[in-house]
Each structure stands twice: as structure tokens, then as C-alpha cells.
Image (spheres, rainbow, N blue to C red):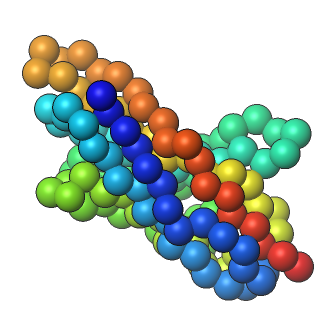
Amino acid sequence: QVQLVESGGGLVQAGGSLRLSCAVSGNIFSIDVMGWYRQAPGKQRELVATITSVGRTNYADSVKGRFTISRDNAKKLVYLQMNSLKPEDTAVYYCNANLRSRYGLVSTYWGQGTQVTASS
């Protein structure tokens, strides 16, 4: 059974910083792309940032220059450093991991989500 557990969310004033962490555990052969998504009330879930197993990153335009995604492959962790937070960043943030089996099949897993609130 695979689990993704996020931590690090909370309430911060606009302009502040938070760091999210996500730990992947369970029966894992290898991890491909990992990422962070977010969902604000009344809106669809949207991509925030992704990172490949070799460290190639991709960001939503709205967070470029403010957020940084990173990962520790040995520890099966992915991080999201969020700086200069804005009220519009307020959302539930979800960790995502694409796990590859020994047979080459890829399955997608999600964490339970962590609330990030940036107050104005």
C-alpha cells in the first residue's frame, strides 16, 4: 500500500513563506514525476509545480519566481518552498507522485491535502 503524507501547511500573512513536504512510503519500485497541485474553494484543481526524477522542473506561470519544488530521491520526499505568498495562493495543496512498477506500469497517487492560507 502506497501512502503520500503532506506536512507544512498553515496560516501566514501575505508576503510570508511556507515549506511543504510530502513523504512517500509503501511498496515502491521507482518514482517518476512528482508534483504539487492546489484547489481553491469553488475552483478546479490546478498544477503548481512538477519535478522529474532527474530534477527537471515545471511551474505554473502564477508561481514562477516565488515557489521552488525539489525532491530527495533517497528519502522519497518532495518539497515545495513557497515565498512571497499572496492571498490568491490560498488553497488546499496536494502532493502527487507517479510510481513505476518493476513491469513498467505507472500509477498515480495523491496525498490527503494540506491547507495553505495567506491572509491579506
**Residue 109 pos. (x, y %):** 42, 31
Task: Please state if 114 lies on the left or on the right of 70 as rendered.
Answer: right
* Residue pictured at 19% horizontal, 34% vertical: 28
Task: Please state if 88 lies on the left or on the right of 73 as rendered.
Answer: right
**Residue 82 pos. (x, y %):** 57, 72
Q: Nearer the viewer, residue 88 or 93?
A: 93
**Residue 81 pos. (x, y %):** 50, 72
* Residue pictured at 49% horizontal, 62% vertical: 7
**Residue 44 pos. (x, y %):** 76, 35
> Up-down: is 72 above or below 120?
above
* Residue pictured at 32% horizontal, 46% vertical: 24
> Up-down: is 47 above or below 63?
above
Quarter occupied by residue 4: top left
The total number of labels drawn is 0
The residue at the far left in this view is 102
> Up-down: is 113 above or below 66?
above
* Residue pictured at 49% horizontal, 42% vertical: 111
Task: Please state if 119 lies on the left or on the right of 105 as rendered.
Answer: right
Q: Nearer the viewer, residue 58 or 118?
A: 118
Quarter occupied by residue 72: bottom left
Task: Please state if 33 lies on the left or on the right of 19 as rendered.
Answer: left
Residue 60 in view: no
Where the N terminus falls, by quadrant?
A: top left
Where the C terminus falls, by quadrant?
A: bottom right
Residue 28 in view: yes
